């Protein structure tokens, strides 16, 4: 029902307004006296050296992909989980879903076996 | 035509989605472009809610905002020199890209105008999510696509492992 | 006495009646009711910060054998107000090299999903912001968005500690989200609904007893979602000076602070809804319906106490440990649990009165077996692992 989302819509508007109000209130109250030392990048008392944007290990990309795949799997399973309790031909439904999960678990096992899930 | 609240909300959400989409291609800073993509996804999720496709809206937020955008931001973090001020956001192939985009746009417009869409104005039936769940495991409906989807995801996973191992 | 036992609902109906009496059309009454509801839920979230920060500091202090905050009146329990005044009047420092826009955007974005979750959390059959057919999926989807806000804050700060923290928050998401969703999926499978109110109503035996595996996995996932120790890798104050928070001060810092405590409260309420029976408490909820929200809050406070206890007990995980633990332990055990639930839920039982209890008993036994087998497998893996000799030496020293 679309009317269910009236409340959510109002909530979204108020939730967006909330941080602006809070930050605006603080903006009225707080002092503003910046100086170069104060606004320098913090690094335990030393000057920062070089660029901040360092490159991270690409190995963790595999985790990201495994994550997306399993996220999508879970999304497919939600409607099934809602319907399952009322399905009469449940053995078939269960075998099908077990197959679905099994195929994806195969991917997880493959990544595991290849050592892709290991920090080196 | 009478203007209802629904129209106003539709216009706002469309504007959010479109502004986000323009931001993705127009912003020079790659990280900001990725954030504009998130904005666009959120706008589309709102449009799904307006179409009473609540499951799809949640999936849009969970998968696209929560996973795919994170994947893209992650990729930006993993790529060398992307934040270098010297780095150019566009490359030498922009002309080809423009042509390809224009061609795709033309094809899409052509299809949109040619096909007579079977539009039906009805209320969303209650229990649509349950019906979908039953359809996914019923051999008469979407069982085959459901299982093929898992194979597709498996292929993506194995491919990713093989490519990433060589990095 | 009906009105006092069912005070909240009666009060709501009375206010709606008064508004209608003023000549407001039904849609206007709904609108006012919605706005009031939103503000109440928002204030509830903010109240959580005022209640749980002193609670955290006191509880942790007691566990570490020190008094904790004790200079403000009432044994230091109103320290949160002192904090609030300090945050409001503190100078806002924006680093010169920061990306100014993203630096502001981070604290704004982090609060929005944290409070939005409250829209669907149930405190009673009618005491709920809005019942949604996709309720629990809404909670997971919205709560997951805070990761983007933290990455934005980390990136906008242009600080090395912050950026490492931004990288870690993504890694943490990759680790916890799938086990979290799978544990919720087990609950949906058992109840056949995603509506949070219906989940509570169909929960005869609390699911923490029925499915300890799912409850455990959810607790670990919830800890990670709220960035609580021992999975507070992104803050890690002893390693990288609070990570993404390092360049924030004043109200902007307070926004992250609020978001963390609101999320913690939300995780507590969701956990009590999914696994502890929500507003149900041995029939007390029917005797005195006015106590229903109190029961929910008490259960949530219990969960939060557990979180604090964890914080005082366990050392922080390294992030490769967390991610391997998630994918090699939590995900497999959740998937097995899902299939077990799917079988047990279909065992034909005739008697409708004893049926939920028998099913619960079967599931409980199977869950215990699952946990035992899982721990035996982990033990074997630990013994046969190449790192085992080193572990043995440590164990010998500890003896």
Image (spheres, helix red, strand yellow):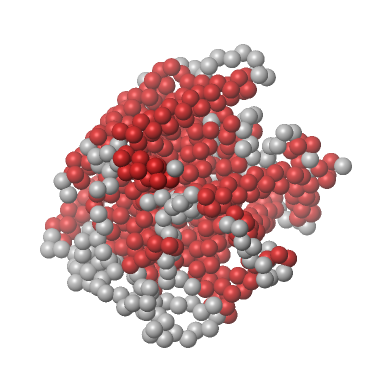
Task: Name the quadrant of the C terminus of chain C.
Answer: top left
Which residue is painted at 42% across and 66% down in the image? C241
**Rendered view: C71 above or below C399:** below
**Rendered view: A44 above or below B61:** below
- In this view of the protein, which residue sits in the foreground, B126 or B108? B126
List x then y, in percent, for residue C171: 36, 51
List x then y, in percent, for residue A21: 56, 70
Residue C86 visible in the current orientation: yes
Which residue is painted at 64% across and 40% down in the image? C278
**Rendered view: C235 above or below A119:** below
Res B144 quadrant in image = top left
Which residue is painted at 55% across and 80% down in the image? A30
- In this view of the protein, which residue sits in the foreground, C154 or C290? C154
List x then y, in percent, for residue B97: 17, 57
C47 left or right, relative to C345: right
- In this view of the protein, which residue sits in the foreground, B132 or C351? C351
**Rendered view: C32 above or below B63:** below
C369 left or right, relative to C73: left
- In this view of the protein, which residue sits in the foreground, B37 or C218? C218
Which residue is painted at 47% across and 30% down in the image? C371
Task: Name the quadrant of the N terminus of chain C.
Answer: top right
List x then y, in percent, for residue C203: 62, 31
Total tally of numbered discs in the picture: 0
C39 left or right, relative to A55: right
Residue B121 visible in the current orientation: no
């Amino acid at each position: 029902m679309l009317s269910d989302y009236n409340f959510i819509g109002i909530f979204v508007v108020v939730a967006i307004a909330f941080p602006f109000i809070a930050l605006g209130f603080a903006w009225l109250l707080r002092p503003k006296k910046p100086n170069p030392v104060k606004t320098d990048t913090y690094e335990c008392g030393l000057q920062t050296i070089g660029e901040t944007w360092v490159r991270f290990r690409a190995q963790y990309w595999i985790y990201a992909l495994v994550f997306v795949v399993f996220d999508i799997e879970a999304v497919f399973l939600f409607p099934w989980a809602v319907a399952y309790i009322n399905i009469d031909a449940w053995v078939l439904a269960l075998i099908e879903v077990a197959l679905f999960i099994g195929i994806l678990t195969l991917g997880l096992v493959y990544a595991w076996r290849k050592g892709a899930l290991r920090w080196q | 035509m009478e203007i209802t609240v629904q129209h106003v909300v539709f216009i706002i959400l469309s504007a959010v989605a479109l502004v986000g989409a323009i931001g993705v291609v127009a912003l020079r800073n790659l990280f900001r472009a990725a954030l504009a993509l998130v904005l666009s996804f959120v706008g589309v999720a709102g449009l799904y809610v307006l179409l009473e496709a609540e499951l799809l809206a949640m999936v849009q937020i969970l998968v696209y905002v929560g996973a795919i955008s994170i994947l893209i931001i992650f990729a930006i973090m993993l790529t060398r020199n992307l934040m270098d001020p010297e780095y150019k956001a566009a490359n030498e192939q922009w002309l080809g890209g423009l042509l390809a985009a224009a061609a795709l746009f033309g094809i899409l417009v052509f299809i949109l105008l040619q096909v007579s869409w079977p539009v039906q104005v009805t209320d969303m039936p209650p229990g649509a999510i349950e019906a979908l769940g039953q359809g996914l495991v019923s051999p008469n409906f979407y069982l085959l696509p459901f299982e093929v989807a898992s194979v597709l995801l498996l292929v993506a996973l194995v491919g990713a492992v093989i490519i990433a191992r060589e990095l | 006495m009906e009105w006092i036992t069912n005070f909240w609902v009666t009060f709501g109906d009375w206010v709606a009646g008064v508004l209608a009496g003023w000549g407001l059309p039904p849609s206007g009454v709904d609108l006012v009711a919605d706005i009031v509801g939103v503000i109440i839920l928002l204030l509830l979230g903010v109240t959580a910060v005022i209640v749980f920060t002193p609670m955290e500091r006191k509880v942790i202090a007691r566990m570490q054998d020190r008094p904790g905050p004790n200079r403000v009146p009432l044994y230091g329990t109103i320290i949160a107000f002192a904090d609030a005044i300090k945050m409001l009047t503190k100078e806002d420092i924006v680093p010169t090299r920061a990306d100014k826009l993203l630096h502001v955007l981070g604290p704004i974005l982090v609060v929005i999903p944290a409070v939005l979750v409250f829209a669907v959390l149930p405190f009673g059959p009618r005491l709920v912001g809005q019942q949604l057919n996709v309720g629990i999926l809404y909670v997971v989807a919205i709560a997951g968005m805070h990761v983007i806000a933290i990455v934005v804050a980390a990136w906008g700060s242009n600080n090395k500690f912050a950026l490492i923290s931004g990288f870690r928050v993504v890694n943490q998401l990759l680790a916890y989200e799938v086990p979290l969703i799978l544990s919720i999926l087990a609950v949906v499978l058992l109840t056949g609904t995603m509506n949070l109110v219906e989940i509570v109503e169909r929960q005869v035996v609390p699911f923490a007893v029925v499915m300890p595996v799912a409850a455990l996995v959810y607790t670990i996932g919830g800890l990670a979602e709220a960035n609580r120790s021992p999975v507070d890798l992104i803050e890690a104050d002893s390693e990288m000076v609070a990570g993404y928070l390092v360049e924030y001060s004043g109200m902007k810092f307070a926004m992250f602070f609020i978001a963390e405590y609101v999320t913690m409260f939300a995780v507590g309420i969701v956990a009590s809804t999914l696994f502890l029976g929500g507003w149900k408490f041995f029939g007390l909820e029917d005797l005195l319906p006015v106590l229903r929200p109190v029961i929910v809050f008490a259960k949530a406070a219990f969960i939060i106490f557990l979180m604090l206890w964890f914080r005082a007990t366990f050392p922080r995980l390294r992030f490769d440990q967390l991610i391997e633990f998630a994918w090699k332990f939590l995900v497999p055990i959740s998937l097995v649990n899902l299939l077990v639930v799917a079988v047990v839920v279909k065992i034909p039982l005739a008697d409708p009165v004893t049926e939920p209890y028998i099913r619960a008993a079967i599931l409980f036994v199977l869950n215990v077996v699952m946990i035992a087998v899982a721990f035996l497998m982990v033990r074997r893996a630990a013994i046969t692992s190449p790192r085992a000799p080193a572990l043995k030496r440590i164990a010998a020293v500890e003896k």
